[in-house]
Image: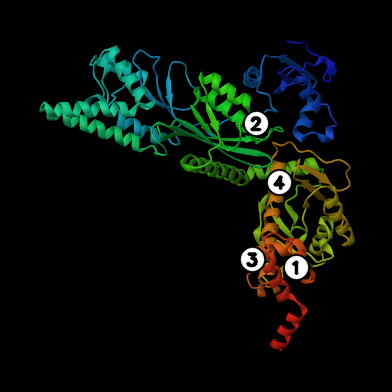
Amino acid sequence: MTAARPLRPETGSIPEDPGVYRFKDATGRVIYVGKAKSLRSRLTSYFADPRTLHPRTRSMVAEAADVDWVVVGSEVEALQLEYSWIKEFDPRFNVKYRDDKSYPYLAVTMGEEFPRAIVTRGAKRKGSRYFGPYAHAWAIRATLDALLRVFPIRTCSSGVFARARRANRPCLLADIGKCSAPCVGRVTEAEHRTIAEDLCSFLGGQARTFQRRLTKEMQEAADLQDYERAARLRDDLGAMERALERNSVVFDESVDADVVGMALDELEAAFEVFHVRDGRIRGQRSYVVERADEADDSELVGRLLIALVEDADEVAPEILTPVTVPSDVREWLAWRRGTRVDVRIPQRGAKRDLQQTVTTNAEQRLALHKARRSGDLTARSKALEEIRDYLDLERAPLRIEAIDISHLGGTGVVGSLVVFEDGAPRPGEYRSYTVSDEGARDDTSAVYEVVHRRFRPREVDGQDDGRTRTFAYAPHLLVIDGARPQVDAAKRALNDRGVTDVPVVGLAKRLEEVWVSGDAEPVILPRTSEGLYLLQRVRDEAHRRALRHQRKTRQGAIRGSALDAVPGLGPSRAKALLKHFGSVTKIRAADETELQAVSGIGPSLAHAIRTALSPDEMLTTSEGES
C-alpha cells in the first residue's frame, strides 16, 4: 500500500490501474471507500469545482484530510476489496445495506454433538445451517412442527437436554413422536445426525426426493399388509405437503432464483428480495438505505447483490433485477458461485409478473418507511429544530407553506399551496391557483403571481370547493419548489405586499439544495437529517397537488372547448393540439398543413378541424343558437 499523502495528490502520482481508494478524516478514521476502473480518473474528479459535486460528495471531500489507495489486478478484485474495507471500517459516507428488521431463520446446529432445530434471528454462527429468511417467526414454527413428525430432530435447549439425560426421562415431544429422544439413547448420535441431515436436505430443496421415497415405502408396506406402518407413512406425507403448502408456488420445480424489486426517491431507496427455491417462494428480505452518494440505479442494485450474498452466504443460479447490473458485479457473483450466474431483467411471462410484484412490495416498503418516519412526533420535532438551526431562523417553523407551479408544455399553468403544521400536513388549508396569462410567461412570473395572491390582505383566494376561505395566520417559513430565480420572485411578491417577516427558501430537486433568500450560495443539509426529509416531503406534497390541479384543469379545458364539436377528434388528439398550439384561437388560425404537423392528425381530420372551427361555421352556430 502506498504511504499516506496530502489530500490533493499530484495527478501524475495516481496510477491509471483499477483499484480501491479510501478517504480519511483528520483523526485517521476512514470516512469513504470506493473502487474505480482507473484510480487517476476517479480520484481527480473529487477535486473539481466543489459546486459541481453532489452535496454528499462535497461534504465528504470537505471533511477528508487524507486519501490513499491500493492497486489490484482487475475490477472483480477491486469489488472484493471494496466490500471488505466497507465491512472493516464502516465508513459513514458509504451506503449501508441492512435489513430494515431482523428476519427469523430456521437453523439446524450441525456443529453440536446432537444437532437441534431452532428459530433464530441476528448474527449467524459457524457450524449451523440456516434456512430462510421468513417473514414471520410463527410461519417457521408451524412449518417445523409439521416436519418434526417426519424428521424427529431435537429442538430443546442445552439445559433441558442435559436435565433429561441426567434424569433418563424424555420430554413430551418424544412421547408424541416429534423427537427421536437422543437424550435417553433411543437413537445413537449417528442416527440422530442422519435425521438432521435429512431435514437439511428437505429444507434445502430436495423435498420431492423425500416425498417419492415415502410414497414408495407406503406402497410397499401396504403390499405387505403392514397397514399400521402404511398409515403412519401416509400421515408423514400429509405433514410434508402441509409444510410445502406454506410456500407459494410461482414457477416450475427446476427454478431457483432471487428476484429483486426497487423503489427510490432523492434521499432513500427501498429494495425487496424474494428467494425462490424449487419454484416456491421460500423467503424474503427488505432493505431501506440512504442514498449517500452519486450511485445510479445500476450501482445501487449491484451493491445490494453483494450485500445479499455476503449475508446469506449463497448465490442463486438466476437473479432477476429491475435494471442492468454492472459487469464486474456479475463476474464477482460467478466467482462466488463457482459457475455462471444468470443476472437479467425479465421481459415477459411469470418471471416478469413476479418481478413487478416484488417491485410493488418495494414501493409499499418505501411508503411505509416514510409514513412511520413522518408519524414519529420525536422525529418531526427534531426536523423543525434542524430547519431552524441550518437556516438560521428566529424560531422553529411550526407552520410551513410550500408553493409549486405546474404546466404542460407552457400551457395550462397552475399553482398549488400546501400547509404543514408541527411537521404534519393540514389538507384543509391547501389551495389551488389558476395562473393568469400574464403570470404564465415563465416559472418566476407564475411564482410571483401565486405568492402575491396568497399574501393579499385578508386573503380570500383559492377555489378548490367554491367557498371563500381565509388563512388563519402567516407561515413561519415559505418553501418554493425551485432554486434562486424562483426564490427571488417570491421575495419580490412579499416585498410588494409589505410582508417582511416571512423567510423564503427554495428546494431544488436535482441536488436537494436549499436556497435562502439573499444568500449567494445554497445551504446543504446533511442527507440523513430529519430537517431535509421534512422539507422534501413538503415540496413533494405541493408538487403532487399542483399536478392534480393541472390535470383537472386540462381535462376541463378539453371537455369545454370548441374542439368537442370536431367529428372524429378524441380527447387525446385534442390534448395534443392544445399542447402544440397553446389555445383554440391559435388552432383556428392554423391551416391544414400546420394541423397535420401534430402527431395523429391526418389530412381528413385536419380538414374536419378546419371546417368545424372556421369563422363561417362559428357564425352559423351562433345564429342558430340565437
Instruction: Please name the amino acid that badge 4 sits on.
Output: Gln
Residue under pointer 1: 592
Q: From what the image shows, is residue 313 above or below residue 576?
A: above
Answer with mark 1 or mark 3, whichever residue precedes in sequence: 3
Mark 4 or 3: in front is 3
Instruction: Please name the amino acid that badge 3 sits on.
Output: Pro
Residue 97 appearing in the image: no
Mark 3 or 2: in front is 3
Instruction: Compare residues 607 and 467 and report the one nearer the observer.
Output: 607
Residue under pointer 4: 536
Instruction: Compare residues 494 and 68 and report the one nearer the observer.
Output: 68
Label 3, secondary structure: give it.
Answer: helix
Q: Residues within 10 Å of mark 3 (few under 14, many from 20)?
A: some
Instruction: Please name the amino acid that badge 2 sits on.
Output: Glu
Q: Quick one: quadrant of the N terminus?
A: top right
Q: How many marks?
A: 4
Residue 169: quadrant of the picture: top left
Q: CA distance from mark 1 to mark 3?
A: 19 Å
Label 2, secondary structure: give it.
Answer: helix
Q: Position of residue 561 (x, y in %)?
A: 70, 72
Q: Quick one: quadrant of the C terminus?
A: bottom right
Residue 521: quadrant of the picture: top right
Is 309 on the left or on the right of 60, as rendered?
left
Q: Position of residue 31 (x, y in %)?
A: 72, 23
Residue under pointer 2: 299
Answer with mark 4 or mark 3, whichever residue precedes in sequence: 4
